[in-house]
Amino acid sequence: MTLFGTDGVRGVAGVDLTADLARSIASAAVPVLAAGVGRPLVAVGRDPRVSGGWLQDAVVDGLTAAGADVALLGVIPTPAVARAIADGLPGQAARPTFGVVISASHNPAPDNGIKLFGPGGRKLDEATERQIEQLLDNSGDAPARPGKVAVDLSDNPTWYVDALLRTTPVRLDGLKVLVDCANGAAATVAAAAYGGAGADVTVINTDLSGEHINDGCGATHLDGLAAAVRSSDAELGIAHDGDADRCLAVTSDGEVVDGDVILSILALARQRHGNLPGGRVVVTVMSNLGLHRLMADRGIGVVTTPVGDRHVSERMREIGAVIGGEQSGHTVLSEHASTGDGILTGLHLLAALREAGQTLAQLAAQFPAYPQVLVNVRVPDVAAALSNAAPLAEAASAELGDDGRVLVRASGTEPLVRVMVEAAAAERAQALAHRIAEGIGGDVK
């Protein structure tokens, strides 16, 4: 059985992800992630999807049946659960041993998922996920050791906001910012976090019914935020996704600033302050070629990992890097968090603007972005499609030489092959990407 994808277990709630499966995953996680702990405390949080309530009930059933006590954090950003494990919870002597998040992140409302954070608030490696899957395959013999809901902070996210504000290096007084909460978990804390740091903040898309999460809004749909910023007096806009582990931005003119640009701004700010240990950042293979060239020009090394912020975090720990991330908006600031945290990133981006005395557009202008085209191909057999794509990608790479880049990879969550091409000219990138995609066969998106 293989359940875990790039970031946890995800699918249509009630179809792919049932209450029974959620209960079994939670129960199997206890002996793996809390081995040797007599009475573990497990932090549980969720985004506001309609299915989140009954999935949370199933998760709590599984955890308590396996002998764990539960700390309910309610509707709250995913990184808050990781922080609860790393830093502890107010008024609790014992820190949570691990955490469960019920969220499908940027996916549409009918989907849901289960993300697990291990000791220290870290995402699980593949070996640990396989251990949990093996227990699922052999479940049914474990004796029940009933636990209980020991802590309920469902209506009190102030502990998380306070933790975020303690990391903010400068006040943001008077900075006008518009924040898109994606009708997701950010809506519970964004106004307090950005406002608490001094920003003049307006929040949009704050519907917590769960029915409209990520629906034409948030980090995966930036047009609405861009239009709202252009029609306001805001200096910039910040966008989060449904569980608020991503942060993207738009300038006052509505121009999109992606995760690569945000990471570059933060890295250069750290370099100016002498706070970039090892002089390196960690990114994934999807990072823009412009990031590599800008960092090289400024004397900063770039270390590359496979796609997925857990790979970024693992590599950062290995080499002692303090900043890394993905183009999609997952930015890891390891001095302040064990995983990507969208609101933390937003606060530090605003602080970098304030310290530099420049606008987002001015700082983003230093980034020499290469046109990047991504084409998705839905295929019946991913392995066969990748084999078909290899010679096509090799030929395109040879044609581009040093003036571009080609990457073909499998999706970690869907039966898709993703074709990415960068080139100095957008038309050339578009033509090569579609040549490869059409040569693979399948349904080109």
Image (tube, helix red, strand yellow):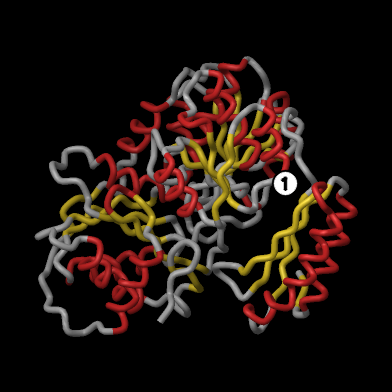
Please state the horizontal and vertical placement of residue 37, each as a whole percent of the image: 13, 58
Q: Which amino acid does label 1 sit on?
A: Asp
List the residue tagged with mark 1: 223
Looking at the image, can residue 181 be seen? no
Mark 1 neighbour density, 10 Å: few (under 14) some (14–19) many (20 or more): some
Identify which residue is drawn at 18% across, 66% down. 64
Identify which residue is drawn at 33% across, 65% down. 128
Please state the horizontal and vertical placement of residue 328, each as a whole percent of the image: 61, 49
Left or right of 382, for residue 400? right
Q: Which of 345 and 274 is in front in this view?
A: 274
Left or right of 35, for residue 401? right
Locate the C terminus and report the quarter of the image it occupies: bottom right
Please state the horizontal and vertical placement of residue 353, each as a whole percent of the image: 60, 22
Quarter of the view holding residue 260: top right
Left or right of 185, for residue 398? right
Q: 135 above or below 368?
A: below
Locate the N terminus and report the quarter of the image it occupies: bottom left
Q: 231 above or below 20?
A: above
Identify which residue is drawn at 53% across, 69% down. 110
Q: How many marks?
A: 1
Q: Which of 254 and 268 is in front in this view?
A: 268
Q: Nearer the viewer, residue 148 or 264?
A: 264
Please state the horizontal and vertical placement of residue 114, each as a whole percent of the image: 40, 64
Quarter of the view holding residue 233: top right
Identify which residue is drawn at 45% across, 54% down. 310
Dot 1: what SS?
Answer: helix
Looking at the image, can residue 46 be seen? yes
